[in-house]
Structures are given as structure tokens and as C-alpha cells.
Amino acid sequence: MTTWTRIIAVAGTSAALGLALSGMASADETPTGPAPMTISAEQVKKRCEERVPKIEARIKAATDRINGDANTRGSTKWLEAQAKIARDAGKESKAKLFDARRELRGERVTKLGDAQKRIDTFQTEHCAYPGGTK
């Protein structure tokens, strides 16, 4: 091999290694957060007029069901009554299942409350129309 061939081979190897390392360095950089989402005014209006009321109705229905009386299937009180009936019949494992479901209802009410707060925030920030009405 001649001297010039060696110089070219070393330079080419160095360049390739430099490109590879710079590619790895740029791959390690992660974005700091999600990119902002932009939607048109028509899309915002549609969400405010159609989607938000549906979500609010679902939140209200689920909350009302959970907080219902012993005759409302799926309510906390109904689950307590079903657990009592199962225990009275000697079905302890079934009673434990009803008790576990009843305990989850408290978490569900908290999540529904958080969802309602997010909806309220969205409405405050995006659904205020000129003239002060929603």
C-alpha cells in the first residue's frame, strides 16, 4: 500500500466513525414533552358543542349510578347488599368479590371527579364564545 492510499483509508475510516458517533449522539436526545396540538376553530366548536356534553352526561350517569340506592344495580349500596346476601347464603368467596368491587367504586368516583375538572378546564379555556356564553 502506498502512503496516499493509507492516508485516504484512515481519513475515510475517521469520517465514517465520526458520522456514526454523531448519529448515536443525536439519537440519544429525547424531546422534552409532547408537541403542542393545534386544531381549527371549527374542530374546537364541534368538541365544545357535541363531545363535551356527551362526556359530561356519561360522567353524571356513572356518578349517579355509583351513588345510587340499594335498588340501583352497580351502586355501592347495592354491592353491600349483595355481599350481605352472599354471606347469609354461606358464599364467602362471592361476598369477597362484591366487597372488592365496592372498594373500587371509591376510586372510580375520584377518577370521575378528575375527569369533570379536566372538562371544566377545557370549557373555560376553549369554549368561551364571544358574548360570554358557552
Image: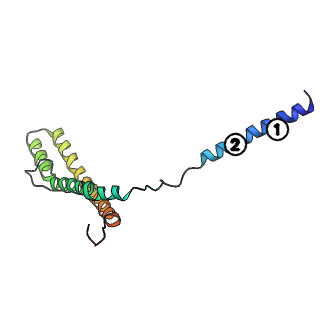
The location of residue 133, given as percent across then percent down, is: 26, 69
User: On the rendered structure, is 74 left or right of 109?
Assistant: left
Marker disc for residue 21:
2
Q: Is residue 108 or residue 123 the one in the foreground?
A: 123
User: Of callouts 1 and 2, which one flags the residue occurring earlier in the amino acid sequence?
Assistant: 1
Bin the neighbour count of mark 2 within 10 Å (Cα to Cα): few under 14, some 14-19, many 20 and up. few
> Which colouring convention does the figure follow?
rainbow
- In the rendered image, the quadrant that contains the C terminus is bottom left
Disc 1 vs disc 2: which is toward the camera? Answer: 1
User: On the rendered structure, is 24 left or right of 106?
Assistant: right
Q: Amino acid at mark 2?
A: Leu
Q: Is residue 40 above or below residue 23?
A: below
How far is the residue under mark 1 from the one under mark 2?
15 Å
Q: Secondary structure at mark 2?
A: helix
Q: Residue at x 25, y 53 (%)?
A: 108
Q: Residue at x 8, y 43 (%)?
A: 88
The location of residue 128, given as percent across then percent down, is: 31, 67
Marker disc for residue 93:
none
Q: Are marks 1 and 2 in contact (CB under 8 Å)?
A: no
The location of residue 25, given as percent across then percent down, is: 65, 46
Give the farthest residue toward the top. 1
Q: Which residue is mark 1?
A: 11
User: On the rendered structure, is 100 left or right of 10?
Assistant: left
Q: Secondary structure at mark 1?
A: helix
Give the farthest residue toward the bottom. 131
Q: Is residue 93 or residue 101 the one in the foreground?
A: 101
Quarter-wise, where is residue 1 in the image? top right
Q: How many marks?
A: 2
